Image: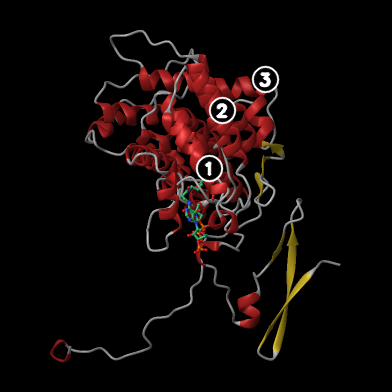
Amino acid sequence: MSKTAEIKFEDKSYSLPIVEGTENEQGIDIAKLRAESGLITLDPGFKNTGSTKSAITFLDGEKGILRYRGYSIEELAEKSTFLEVSYLLIYGELPTAEQLADFQSQIKVHTLVHEDIKKILEGFPSNAHPMGVLSSLVTALTAFYPESLDPNRSSDKVNMSIIRILAKMPTFAAWAYKNEVGHPVNYPDNSLDYCSNFLKMMFALPAEKYEVDPVISSALDKLLILHADHEQNCSTSTVRVVGSSQASLYASISAGINALWGPLHGGANSAVINMLEGIKKDGGDTKKWMAKAKDKDDPFRLMGFGHRVYKNFDPRAKIIKKAADDVLDKLGVNDPILDIAKGLEKEALEDQYFVDRKLYPNVDFYSGIIYRALGIPVDMFTVMFALGRLPGWIAQWKEMRENNEPIGRPRQIYVGENLRPYVGMEKR
Ligand code: SDX
């Protein structure tokens, strides 16, 4: 006997089915609510509303659990690679050695981008934010691969679009950086692995030989794994809603990049470093800034803290915090803002305001410290987040398309003017 929830309204009651997931999460299926009762639900920010049923990522915010296709983030971060995790998220299973090799070689042959894309890049001033450049170049792919515009093509054609954007995103990201620093772009080097190729495209200079530091490449690979998916977050929900109109994969991903850009979402990793630098410049008085974060009249928030779902430690933050110590130690980097970050974390975890609101460090709190140690500039941090989140966006878009989900179109409660007659200019 399936469970139901009863809603009583005025003199009637309505029985609604309960949907139960494989991890015992339960939700009220309100698909028939409006037809039967005339009622809708209202939930700004969708804090209590599920948009879909998904088999890709499981989060338990109370227990601080994150799993991709059933595998724990801790195991994947320690034992897997970013491309293997990308395959897992997109196709649902860990690849065999042969499948992974084929996936890697398919990606390698598509890392080059059409030479005309350089003309688009050259149209951007050097002060263009790399996230704006990235989302523009991704949208430009629709012009160079018009067959990608139709998401209803055969699965192998859709898969070609998936391979192309996985292959070209590191090139776009590195080129966005080169545009910012006014250096000539580097072309992909397919003799290198995914992260090493990206680092070389980012940092190689014409006059010098560039050797990829394996410590840096391995740290980047782990960071990309940790960012690869996170169920129905703001940018992924954007990708799903845009894709639900049957817009193309590239149009949907470009929309996701722009949603991620915001400082409350993926833009937080840059905002954390700017905040820590500000505190350092201000003399390192963390107590003053904690007071500002708690002051309702002060717009300042402790960036990198708090989360819509995690009301316990973000498991990614724990892994990144340890990796920050390891990477900075291996690179011989002593970054004073790491100490400021740890001081802030300690104070916040002992502060009633943060304890009451279950505000813990999230994925963005420590990641910027590692990116900085890897030589990546602050306004490229969110581009790094996008690079990591790409396979998740693809997997979620693919699942939404394969499940033939309806176009996303929420309702509203109207609170404007009631019917009124037009007023001529002479009477206004
Ligand atoms: C990401 O969703 C995802 O999965 C996202 C992500 C992913 O992988 O895709 O995990 C990546 O976006 C991580 C979050 C990065 N953003 C930040 O670090 C920005 C700082 N954090 C906050 O802005 C906030 O915590 C959010 C946006 C992350 C979550 O906001 P919610 O869920 O809407 O919670 P809220 O704003 O309603 O806050 C609840 C209370 C409020 O106080 P009261 O009104 O109850 O008195 O907590 C307070 C807030 O003022 N609060 C903070 C705070 N975060 C929440 N107060 C000070 N500093 C903060 N950082």
Q: Position of residue 296 (x, y in %)?
A: 42, 63
Crowdedness near tag 2: few (<14), some (14–19) or many (≥20) residues, C-alpha within 10 Å = some
Residue 9 position (above or below residue 60): below
Tell me the quarter of the image containing the N terminus: bottom right
Q: In the rendered image, which residue does mark 3 sit on?
A: 98
- The kind of residue tagged 2 is Ala
SS label for mark 2: helix
Q: In the rendered image, which residue does mark 2 sit on?
A: 323
**Mark 3 Cβ inside 8 Å of ligand 1:** no
Q: Distance between the residues labelled 1 and 2?
A: 16 Å
Q: Position of residue 228 (x, y in %)?
A: 56, 37
* Residue 345: image tag: 1
Q: Earlier in the sequence, mark 3 or mark 2?
A: 3
Residue 38 falls in image quadrant = bottom right
Q: Nearer the viewer, residue 327 or 283?
A: 283
Residue 5 position (above or below residue 357): below
SS label for mark 3: helix
Rendered residue at 45%/14% (across/down): 212
Residue ranking furthest to the left: 426
Question: Of circles 1 and 2, which is in front?
Answer: 1
